[in-house]
Amino acid sequence: MLGDNVRRMRSYSNITKTRLALMVKIGRPLLNRIENGTADIRLSVIAKLADSLATTPDFLLTKHSDEDIRAEIEQREASAAVPAMRHARLY
């Protein structure tokens, strides 16, 4: 479940495994094992994964459909655009 959610969120967000591993400060082999569901990982790594994917640990640890994952990404992108719009100047 965790590995599948991480893989799908990373993939749908167009983030490479190498980039996500760098963002989380873990090795790519560990990220491979996480996505394959064969790694025992600490809660701190789950929190870093969630932060890097702009979601919550709870979301990563809960089973979701592809539609749920895409909606979470769209919500993240929409909320990221709001601060940028607040600083835009209108002429």
Image (cartoon, rainbow, N blue to C red):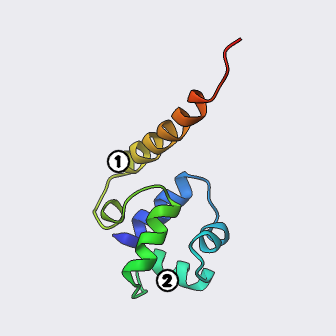
The foreground one among 71 and 75 is 75
In the rendered image, residue 88, in percent from the top left (x then y), is placed at 65, 25
Mark 1 or mark 2, which is nearer the start of the sequence?
2
Q: Classify the position of the C terminus by image quarter.
A: top right
26 over 62 or under it: above or below: below
Q: On the image, which quarter does residue 41 sit in?
A: bottom left
The foreground one among 22 and 64 is 22
Inter-mark Cα distance, 2 to 1? 23 Å
Residue denoted by label 1: 68
Q: On the image, which quarter does residue 32 sit in?
A: bottom right
In the rendered image, residue 31, in percent from the top left (x then y), is placed at 54, 78
Disc 2: CA contacts within 10 A as few (<14), some (14-19) or many (>=20): some
Residue denoted by label 2: 33
Count every numbered label the image shows and give the total: 2
Circle 1: element type: helix
Q: Is residue 89 left or right of residue 11?
A: right
The foreground one among 88 and 66 is 88
Amino acid type at circle 1 is Asp
Circle 2: element type: helix
In the rendered image, residue 86, in percent from the top left (x then y), is placed at 56, 28
Which residue is rendered at x = 65% and y = 73% of the image? 22
Which residue is rendered at x = 52% and y = 33% of the image? 82
